[in-house]
Amino acid sequence: ATELCTTAADACMHALGDNSVPPREARRELDVIVASMRGLLAAERGAAMLLRKDEQEGEEEQEARIPTLRPNILLPRVASAWAGVVATLDDGRSGVLDAGLDALVAICAACDSAFLARRFAEQAAP
């Protein structure tokens, strides 16, 4: 699931901040990015739950499962998408600004970090 989410998010980055992309396509790309971020968040939460369970069960079970878990997969995608999503806030086309705001809200809610709140205040809010 994480590979699908990262691939989908990466494939949509090209449309962000590009005014030559039709508005409908830009909105769709932003929707895919939001869904991908939510999927990555769910994968990270699931991995954390499995790791906690493995710690309770013992090392044998933990060693068998840890190679399949990929912690910290959401924030690199946020970093990749951030500039493009923020650029959509300057897009005056119908629906693109709304989709950009929705994407920023979803990203900020998923990450829930002071760093992202500060970055939002400095770069997206003005």
Image (spheres, rainbow, N blue to C red):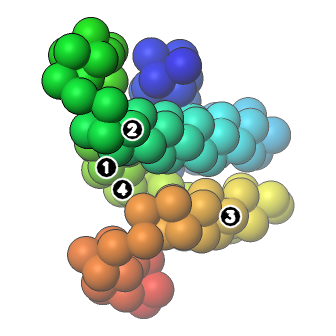
- Tell me which amino acid carries mark 3: Asp
Q: Name the residue under label 2.
A: 53
Q: Where is residue 98 in the image (x, y as percent from the top left)?
A: 74, 66
Does the image show residue 30? yes
Does 45 sit left or right of 62 as displayed?
right
| Residues at marks 1 and 3, CA–CA distance in whole angstroms | 18 Å
- Tell me which amino acid carries mark 4: Ala
Q: Name the residue under label 3.
A: 102
Mark in front: 4 vs 2: 2
Mark in front: 1 vs 4: 1
Q: Mark 1 points at which residue?
A: 75
Mark in front: 2 vs 3: 2
| Residues at marks 4 and 2, CA–CA distance in whole angstroms | 37 Å
User: Residue 56: which quarter of the image?
Assistant: top left
Q: Do the residues labelled 1 and 3 touch (CB within 8 Å)?
A: no
Does 105 sit left or right of 24 as displayed?
left
When the figure is inspected, residue 88 is found, relative to residue 19, above or below; the finding is below
| Residues at marks 2 and 1, CA–CA distance in whole angstroms | 24 Å
Q: Do the residues labelled 1 and 4 touch (CB within 8 Å)?
A: no
Does the image show residue 51? no
Q: Report the quarter where the C terminus lies.
A: bottom left
Mark 3 Cα-neighbour bin, 10 Å: few <14, some 14–19, many ≥20: some
